[in-house]
Image (spheres, coloured by chain):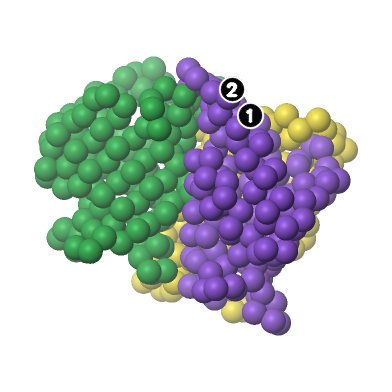
Chain colours: A green, B purple, C yellow
Amino acid sequence: MDAQYAQAQHFYARQMQLLDAGSTDEWAATFTEDGVFEVGDSAVHGSEDIARAARKVADEFAAAGVQRRHWIGMLTVTPGGDGELTARSYALVLEIPTGGEVVVRRSTVCTDRLVRSDGQWRVKHRRVTRDGLDPA
Amino acid sequence: MDAQYAQAQHFYARQMQLLDAGSTDEWAATFTEDGVFEVGDSAVHGSEDIARAARKVADEFAAAGVQRRHWIGMLTVTPGGDGELTARSYALVLEIPTGGEVVVRRSTVCTDRLVRSDGQWRVKHRRVTRDGLDPA
Amino acid sequence: MDAQYAQAQHFYARQMQLLDAGSTDEWAATFTEDGVFEVGDSAVHGSEDIARAARKVADEFAAAGVQRRHWIGMLTVTPGGDGELTARSYALVLEIPTGGEVVVRRSTVCTDRLVRSDGQWRVKHRRVTRDGLDPA
């Protein structure tokens, strides 16, 4: 369990570094092909569409010259009966425009179902609730 | 030691999730019955009073429609001779009112004595110093 | 690998606690004697000069009554062929003046080459890029 915990932490660190680097295809590949990404009321289905949606957002931030940083913290991991993990964490979204001033844009809670696929953990289902905006 | 480190991280993640969810009784149960919680000049003694104090604060934030998020980071763990652990960490307190704007309310240092009780780690003594307010 | 990951996390927690406590000599001793610290365009060579530079900054913040807190997050660790580790992380710099208001001063990315020396991990080379200020 402790090894699994470190693995999950490492997984999220890699995943967030990929997203913030604009490597949206590699990032989307950390979801299963049929993965679902829900934020608030909206959902994107399938890693292909997840990649496309992420690319669009990444391009907008790049065009605006704004660096995003996603921080995951307070991660808890609960094993399910079928080899799945439920991972719950806080996620903080920072935005840093040219000049270096840091904006703490959003505080969220991220609840993932992680499955093992091709020797790696992947997100089968992600639900993000944004503090102050979405019902908890 | 490395396993213990992951355990301590997981412990704090669970503990903070409980507090921020308003599950103050479950949160207070992560202290020993005779646990002490010191912040600055004031101290609360015993998990029952710790629960009561936490409930009061949680109700105030709930009434105000403000979500709190406690982040623990930069955790160091030092084993004592008697099976205790001394855990020192940074703790950040975020507040997010309706609308989603994030306020980084407080930066603190948290020094805990953790003991093993009923198969779990529990806080026997917590001392929190608030940066910029309390002597370090 | 998972044990190494926890070790690296613990290493950074200790290192940041030392720096923020103003224990700049102990902090500089977490670099190798020939260690290099690069931030943006400038570099400091050797743990002695690294200590000296850190002392100067620490004294300035102490004189101004400002507490700094360095948070490391989203850490990834990649083993090299020769027992080295490449560690990449996000680092957030907080400043808290008297009164307790928290300023999130800087978001950075920290890329370290860690080597084993005298039974501990030490930084042989650190490169910090500041979001919004330095090329990524």
Percent position of residue C107, x then y: 54, 36
Q: Mark 2 belongs to which amino acid?
A: Ala
Alpha-carbon span between mark 1 and mark 2? 6 Å
**Which of the chains bears the disc numbered 2?**
B
Identity of the residue drawn at 24% across and 25% down: A42
Q: Is residue C117 above or below residue C123?
A: below
Q: Is residue B61 above or below residue C94?
A: above
- Residue B60 is tagged as 1
**Which of the chains bears the disc numbered 1?**
B
Q: Are marks 1 and 2 in contact (CB under 8 Å)?
A: yes
- Residue B64 is tagged as 2
Q: Quadrant of residue B104?
A: top right
SS label for mark 2 = helix
Task: Name the image quarter holding the N terminus of chain B.
Answer: bottom right
Identity of the residue drawn at 38% across and 69% down: A1
Percent position of residue A6, x then y: 41, 63
How many labels, in total? 2
Q: Mark 1 belongs to which amino acid?
A: Glu
User: Quick check: can you spot residue A61?
Assistant: yes
C118 or A132: which is nearer to us? A132
- Left or right: B95 in relation to B37: left
SS label for mark 1 = helix
